[in-house]
Amino acid sequence: MPGNKDRIAGLLLGTAAATVACAVAAVFGFLFLFALPVFTGGQGLAVLGGTWQPETGQFGILPMLAASVCLALSALALGWPLALGLCCSIRGFVPAPLARLLLALLRGMTAFPTVVYGFAALFLLVPFMREAAGRGSGLCWATAALVLALVALPTMVLVMDAGIQQMERRLHLTGAALGFNRRQILVHLVLPACRGNLSAAAALGFGRAIGDTLIPLMLAGNAPQWPHSVFDSIRSLTAHIGLVLATDTHSAAYGSLFVAGCLLLLVNVAVQLALRALPTKNGSSATYGYGA
Amino acid sequence: MKHPQLSLITAWAWFSALVVPAALTALTGVLLVRGHGALGSELFFGNVPALDAMTGRIPVWDGIWPACVGTLSLLGLTMLFALIPGIGCGVYLAAFARPAVRAWLGLALDLLAGIPSIVMGLFGFTLLLTLRRTLLPQTGPSLLLASACLALLVLPVLVTTTRGALEALPRQLSLSSAAMGLGQWATMRRVLLPAAGRGILGGVLLAAGRAAEDTAVIMLTGVVANAGLPAGVTARFEALPFTIFYRSAEYRDATELQQGFAAALVLLALSLSLLAGARMLQLALERRWEGTVVR
């Protein structure tokens, strides 16, 4: 009986979907449950303090949060204008063969392992930054931000481009009627109409940059201090989790990991809610490659 | 008509179009220049004869063969975990879910897609702690745990591409098969799934690419620098991305460093070929239904 089969199939597929939903709930639930004792266990809110000095028993992760945010914002400040420039190139500002090449390159970049970026930058960019700064090891905020900008770039370009392509199709007749050429249509009509997509790209890029582990871990120097200058060594929340868990699992620093994890989850929720509030046609369909 | 604004944008477009490929060329260039010399059987197997190394009769200590096998077993297990829920959820979203469910599940998937991979690793770690305190005090970080967490990380890719491939099919397909009296499930199984097969397979390759390059998850759930060939799903293992990360900090001599560069090239080639495969399959799907899609 076909009707019965449909019901069974719907049930089974629903189970698969429910599994996915449960998995999401489990990730949030477990991390919050493990972070809770840190707050209730006598220390109170000390973990959100501003000093990280394990020798004196101070485990404040606020400097790491600041470092994460600074790093992500600076990567965005470098990457977003470049992404916009690349979108303009792809949509008519450079000769078509070059544009096709660029698009292929950007698609390829989505598959670039971050550890490979980190490894190559370690031997190419770091010595250069050491010279530029004139002090330190070259492992600093600026180095990590430059590479992170490159890491977040393809996500941003592909999201922007998806919106621009759709809007271009809708508006090119209007533009042609106004006597505009392709570039003028893009700049005067399409880009202003794509504001939602452009912001969505920024939000996704921010999420990508703040969630990345390997680049800050390999290139930012990992000193747990407040970021003051771009040539300072800083430690991001993600790198903090990797570092502490890799070295010792029984110190008092341990609880701070789960708080760091929760903070990152909350940033992710904020980004997703911001994306939802934006008026885009295809914000979520272009989000592959996001979150590594 | 020449506006200063437009020429400014032209200049910026050219600048971006040149500087990004230049940066990428410089980064891959340094890998090629410093790593190509190490590409060869020595890189993979050290001094062990290839056949003995592949069969595991002689352990390889100074090659990346164990890391390659580790990465491949990780990929296989991850896909084993992710395929059924991923494709199932995609099919459900494309054809069976009610609008309210679709909205909520969509939110859950977006949240899942945005979770940083180190946090997914931390989740695996909490899972491990919980298991240790309750049912299985003997458990440790392992291939099984790492691939379960990786499966969660790549699930959104699988769901999104499956759903996308199904929704890209022309509407006449499902309409005509319904008109012939096929039920919803029969339509899906006999008509839609075969038609979208290539796109779904492309999603599988994309997901595998994500799993192959990820380092942060496995760092917290079972990867180590020296484990030899994976000894089973409950043992710790080596993986290519971690080998690269480890070599970047802990190389002892020029040869090890050169091997690091070469290993990065190998991983890059693996990731890019998975992406290229996915892209080819998806393009083939698009070509097949070109002109028949009614929007």
Image (cartoon, rainbow, N blue to C red):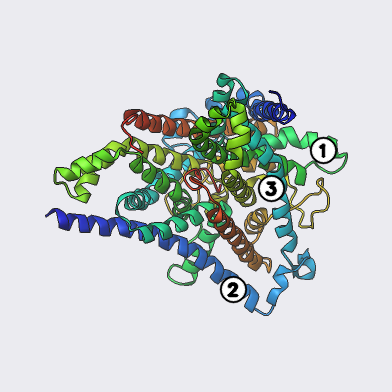
Dot 1: chain letter = A
Q: Do labels 3 and 2 touch, CB within 8 Å?
A: no
Look at 39% across and 43% down and name the residue there: B164
Q: Earlier in the sequence, mark 1 or mark 2?
A: 2
Give the residue number, with chain letter if any, for mark 3.
Answer: A216
Q: Do labels 1 and 2 touch, CB within 8 Å?
A: no
Residue A118 occupies quadrant: top right
- Residue B286: give x, y in percent of width and height: 37, 31
Residue B43 occupies quadrant: top right
Q: Is residue A166 visible?
A: yes
Q: Amino acid at mark 2?
A: Leu
Dot 3: chain letter = A
Give the residue number, with chain letter if any, for mark 2.
Answer: A36
Badges 1 and 2, same chain: yes
- Residue A54: give x, y in percent of width and height: 76, 66
Q: CA separation, marks 3 and 2?
A: 27 Å
Q: CA separation, marks 1 and 2?
A: 41 Å
Determine which of the numbered discs, if any, sits on residue A130 in the image.
Answer: 1
